[in-house]
Amino acid sequence: MSSVVNGSAPNGHVSRILKPGIYAPIPTFFLPDSEDLDLPSFEAHVIRVANAGVGPLIAGSMGEAIHLSHAERVTLIHAARNALDSAGLKHVPLIVGTGAGSTRETIELTKDAAEAGADYAIVIASGYFAGVLTGNKEALKAFWTEISEKSPIPVMIYNYPGASGGIDLDSDIISELALACPNLCGVKLTCGNVGKLTRIADTVSGSDFSSNHPRKNQNAPFLVLGGFTDFITPSTYANGHGAITGLANVAPYSVVELFKVSVASRQDPSLLTKALHLQGIIGRADFTIAKASISGTKYLLEKLYGYGGLPRKPLPPISADAAHALWDHPHTQALVKLERELSGKVKVQ
């Protein structure tokens, strides 16, 4: 077994180290006529973001997990792991979305993902019965408790009301789960609630948390991650651990630089001005680009890197007018300029 893969949990599964930082929910790319998986583009993109210091998360919302069969998710895991290993990135962990309709199916998919090479799972509650689950604290806690107990790999909570029928976990539920479930390794807050992030981070960053509530896997601390880039600097000062953000697909070097400078500014206050400058550029770009959703992100990838394509139906492509407006928007162009400077490419004229 490779020496870079360590930290065996009691269940015998081994996971690569999960660190604070920036992670990207990788899009799933499809061939234009058949809508079959476009694995060469997928593999190239996984390597691109990983080389920039961004951790890949596959089969999430940006990856159109709801449009993927179980077999396709497994295929993507194998492809991503093989691509990373072949590129000399064996140390990079794979986070995989395994949320499904029922607790039973989620557990099955999580086990399949672990067998295929996933290091961590991220799980969202299905919104199909949101009318019953919303507000039912015990049912929601039971969902992540059972999955984390039966999963062979550490599990991250995914809180995204927009993709789960409005189910929005509050800070009490998430904090209680963190305290009670040693196989939970964090939370992604795509609710955009900075106060919630602050409260949860305070709970898990206290000196007594790691000693009184150790994780089952020593390589899997409980990370509190935002779902957008517009509050990375403030969340760093609230003991947050970074972000899982779709914008890191488009501008991985820029978002990584923002996180690094924000963290460093806590020790060197003279860097705070730079952090806030980067935060302004990136926050405005995130606000603009996020509104274009998956199709907009894929369009920008096509424009910048030569691959992207269309989402799977029934998601529509971005219209030509909207695409041109997105590319020409000053927020987008400011980000593109920054990204090209940081990645060492020729500056935009």
Image (tube, rainbow, N blue to C red):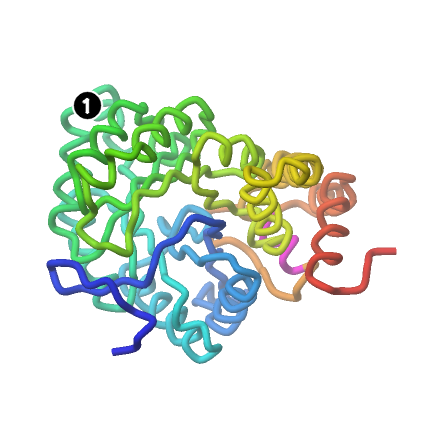
Magenta stretch: includes residue 91: no
Depth check, front residue: 2 or 95: 2
Left or right: residue 195 versus residue 165 is right
What count of labels does the image hold? 1
Percent across and percent down for residue 218 are 24, 54
Secondary structure under badge 1? helix
Classify the position of the C terminus by image quarter. Answer: bottom right
**What residue did someone put label 1 on?**
137
Q: Which residues are magenta?
A: 296-302
Query: At 69% across and 61% down in the image, what residue appears?
Result: 343
Please state which of residues 36 and 150 is positioned toward the viewer in this rendering: 150
Q: To which quarter of the image does residue 258 belong?
A: top right
Q: Position of residue 1 (x, y in %)?
A: 25, 78
Residue 167 in view in this figure: no
Location of residue 288 (image quadrant): top right
- Number of residues whose C-alpha sits closer than 10 Å to that of mark 1, classed few (under 14), some (14–19) or many (20 or more): few
